[in-house]
Image: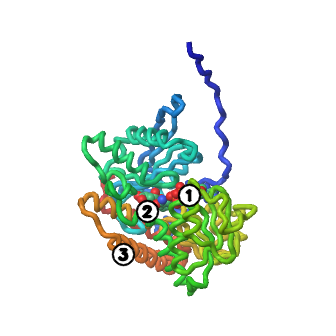
Amino acid sequence: MAATTVYKYKEPAPRVDAENPLESMMSRFNVAAEILGLDEETYEVLKAADKQVIVHIPVTMDNGKVRVFEGYRVIHNTILGPSKGGIRYDKNVHLDEVKALAAWMTWKCAVVDIPYGGAKGGIICEPTKMSAGEIERLTRGYTLAMKDVFGPDRDIPAPDMGTGPREMAWLMDEFSKTVGGTSPAVVTGKPLVMGGSLGRTEATGRGVMVATMAALKTLDLDPHNVSAAVQGFGNVGSWAAKLLSEKGVKIKGLSDVSGAYWNDNGIDIDEAIAYKNAHAGRLDGFQGATMLENADDLLTTDVDVLVPAAVEDVITEHNAHNIKAKLIVEGANGPTSASADPIINEKGIMVVPDILANSGGVTVSYFEWVQNKQGFKWSEKMVTDRADRIMNDAFEKVYQTSRKYDVPMRIAAYVVAIDKVAQTYKFRGGY
Ligand SMILES: NC(=O)C1=CN([C@@H]2O[C@H](COP(=O)(O)OP(=O)(O)OC[C@H]3O[C@@H](n4cnc5c(N)ncnc54)[C@H](O)[C@@H]3O)[C@@H](O)[C@H]2O)C=CC1
Ligand SMILES: O=C(O)CCC(=O)C(=O)O
């Protein structure tokens, strides 16, 4: 008879970061709500998530044992349209983080004026330590568990950290089985051959580049005389670094989970991307730069532009004093904790906030969804021209709002977003 495995309780590892992204989101929301003079009813409606779904997904691992994973989907708000937002696979996923990310999606879609509400999903797992088969079973299990949440006119997921076109393809396939047809518009960020949009892969990084160019113009800086450091070298960071370098910006620093890399003469980004692609998505061992002793120092290096494009709460009250950049363009969601805001503002650093800077991704996701519904593919030029225009218009609107109210760009972006959602709420009524 096979031996029975005896269950042993393991204390979950405590979270190491003291910052809470949900609190950071709320503190900016509160400032913007006050500027707008939001009434109490609207404030209460917009502040809380509409729905939070927690699921436990049993997955047969390659060793034959069943492991149960915890997954979330938070629908923050659907006043502007069906909810939209990525799915994150990471060991540090937690509910408050997903709630903050879902709210940021609501504000982001409103800033770029696309007809979506906000949502986000996440599963606590370590995809780099799982086989493709295990990730596929996990993704299909999560999709089945969320079959009544997802839907092309209800809630439309997309990639985020730790997920990409491969996972979106499995999700689309599994969801399609539950409805008995092919349902491409249920998810965006799919592979091109199955209804993905040209330009989606690079869209977030491209938007970061477009926002950086717009910000440099307001600062009267020529991209050819500007240096930058990019934290995170995944989808967003690598595309942002590549497209910025093509505009003449000298990328002196890069980092990923393996550490930070520095070259005072500028890093060859194509070389770094080729290296990463050949080394399981990581930069360790990359010879085109020297490794910094302390990876966190990347954020305080002597560069003009800082692009945090990895995780939340990396710029805090502890390191904000030492930042030398004149401009921060937030490729990541929530990289700056609210505790750092006053220090950054005091130093006169311009911040293009996440809900504006990284909105190129959801904008092209919206285009993908429109193409799926039309059953008609757009050219790459049509996608990028339209996305660039939306990004430039949104930047201008937020910039003008920051001047009108004499507030930083971050608060201005919240003002633009909350105003749009609040006005729509008033017209729709019916709650
Ligand atoms: N993929 C997308 O279209 C969008 C992503 N975002 C945000 O951008 C950020 C990055 O997402 P993706 O590039 O999609 O993820 P990804 O999974 O493709 O890449 C993440 C990168 O960050 C690195 N990383 C992780 N922890 C790090 C740390 N502590 N220090 C330095 N590097 C670290 C990883 O090694 C990897 O290079 C996230 O905050 C995500 O929410 C925002 C809008 C859209
Ligand atoms: O492409 C999308 O729909 C959402 C991407 C996302 O999760 C984000 O913008 O944070």
Residue position marked by numbered label 3 in the rendering: 385
Residue position marked by numbered label 2 in the rendering: 201
**Of callouts 2 and 1, the N-terminal one:** 2
Which of the numbered marks, if any, corresponds to residue 278? 1
Estimate how packed mark 2 is, as few (under 14), some (14 to 19) or many (20 or more) residues with alpha carbons within 10 Å.
many
- The x and y percentages for residue 363 are 39, 65
Which of the numbered marks, if any, corresponds to residue 95? none
Q: Amino acid at mark 2?
A: Thr
Q: Residue at the spot x=63%, y=71% of the render? A: 229
Image quarter hosting the N terminus: top right
Is 195 situated left or right of 89 in this image?
Answer: left
Q: Amino acid at mark 3?
A: Asp
Q: Residue 366: name its quadrant.
A: bottom left
Mark closer to the observer (2, 1): 1
Q: Amino acid at mark 1?
A: Ala
In this picture, is 99 found above or below 290? above
SS at mark 1? helix
Is 39 situated left or right of 261 in this image?
Answer: left
Estimate how packed mark 3 is, as few (under 14), some (14 to 19) or many (20 or more) residues with alpha carbons within 10 Å.
few
In this picture, is 144 found above or below 250? above
Label 3 beta carbon within 8 A of ligand 2:
no
Q: Residue at the spot x=32%, y=48% of the render? A: 151
Q: CA distance from mark 1 to mark 3?
A: 32 Å
Q: Which residue occupies the foreground of this view, 88 or 111? A: 88
- The x and y percentages for residue 163 are 48, 51
- Which residue extends farthest top? 1
Ligand 2 rendered quadrant: bottom left
